[in-house]
Amino acid sequence: MHRDIVDIAGYMRDVGRRARAASHALARADTDTKNRALHAIATAIRHACEPILAANAEDVADAKKEGLEPALIDRLTLSAKSVEAMAQGVETVAGLPDPVGEVSELREQPTGIKVGRMRVPLGVIGIIYESRPNVTADAAALCIKSGNAAILRGGKEAIRANQAIAECVRTGLRDAGLPEDGVQVVETTDRAAVGELLRMNEFVDIIVPRGGKDLIERVMAESRIPMIKHLDGVCHVYIDADADVEMAIKIADNAKTQRYGTCNTMETLLVAESVAPQVLPRLCKIYREKGVELRGDERARAIFPDMNPAAEADWFAEYLAPILAIRVVKDVDEAMEHIARYGSQHTDAIVTANEERARRFLREVDSSSVMWNASTRFADGFEFGLGAEIGISTEKLHARGPVGLEGLTSQKWVVLGEGQVRG
């Protein structure tokens, strides 16, 4: 349970010190030991299903009293099915290949030495997140498997469920002979704890913010620690002049309407002028039937008048709602210019049968995920074969796109010799 802590700075520094000490043991742990911990955590979560749900019910009741939005309450609410999914998610991570210690690119040099790169843990990862209690289990599992210690600071709305899940994580670590401090859930809801965490660069190696724009903007403003983060998901689908029309309609429909509130949902549709008269009437009819508000430029509205005029702000917007901006462009160059100006470097897709044009788009669009003939909704760690993800990064250094186990490691150079000395 959360507790009132008077000395927040002292408490957080103690958390940091313990995490740093635990990180050394986790970095040394072999794959079998880490997997044993993960399976024990999954078992503990299943055994604690009733206490987790009871804790969550209290969180949900408080959230309703405080007038949280229905969408937030929905993300907060757990069920027996979601607790089982949480346990299965931890077991899935146990089944993933362990990246730690993997040596790649080992090449013999003219001197006879062999030079390669070895994957190693980052150290201590601070994760700040909101609403979803399942993130506690997911983040703990990914950090343990990648040999990192974790400091988890969930939202105050999920404090009881997070602590109940944290007890299961401690049990699993203890059963595997690993330090319980390897994963710590911050026990206070005081926002000052976030500020302290963001300044503890002597204890924390990287920060991962998972939440709304306000949270990520705060972390960007205050953190002294490198981050894995994305701010906006302004994702585009460009339907090219050489697109298969049926394929284009299917992809553009899915990219927008499969789920509205995710960061990989299409927010702007770009259509080449030569195919716009064929594509837009059919596609817009589908959107209208599904209750999507359409905001188009003059050329789009000339083809399908039943849409509102788009303002300049619409091209920058991440709606996370059934609203879509539509623009008719001359060609792939104008589409890429639009994406470069208004996009957020998250996920962008081209639909075309023209391979040369597609490869230009893949090469030149500067986003963390770029797709050819596929929905933007595939920009996800599970769909990319990572098993799970800690988040999505639009940063250019270290990790980019969905971040799985490999993204929670770094590489160091290793040299294998047989007594060589430099002349």
Image (cartoon, helix red, strand yellow):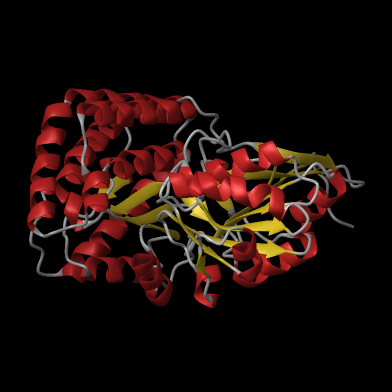
Q: Position of residue 400 (x, y in %)?
A: 59, 54
Q: Residue at x 43, y 45 (%)?
A: 290
Query: Which residue shows up at 83% across the image and 46% down it?
Result: 420
User: Which percent across, then down, holds residue 235?
Assistant: 56, 57
Quarter of the image that includes the C terminus: bottom right
Above or below for 367 versus 317 = above
* Residue sitting at x 35%, y 47%: 22
Examine the rendered structure and indicate whether residue 128 appears above or below residue 250: below
| Residue 356 seen anywhere in this rendered image of the structure | yes
Q: Give the residue drawn at x 51%, y 35%.
A: 382
Residue 50, horizontal then vertical, whole percent: 12, 28
| Farthest right residue in view | 110
In the rendered structure, the answer to whether residue 175 lies left or right of residue 188 reads: right
On the image, which quarter does residue 276 sit in?
Answer: bottom right
Q: Is residue 20 left or right of residue 64?
A: right
Q: Is residue 99 above or below residue 282?
A: above
Residue 206 image-quadrant placement = bottom left
Image location (x, y in percent) of residue 39: 34, 24
Note whether residue 390 is visible: no
Q: Nearer the viewer, residue 106 or 326?
A: 326
Number of dots carrying numbers? 0
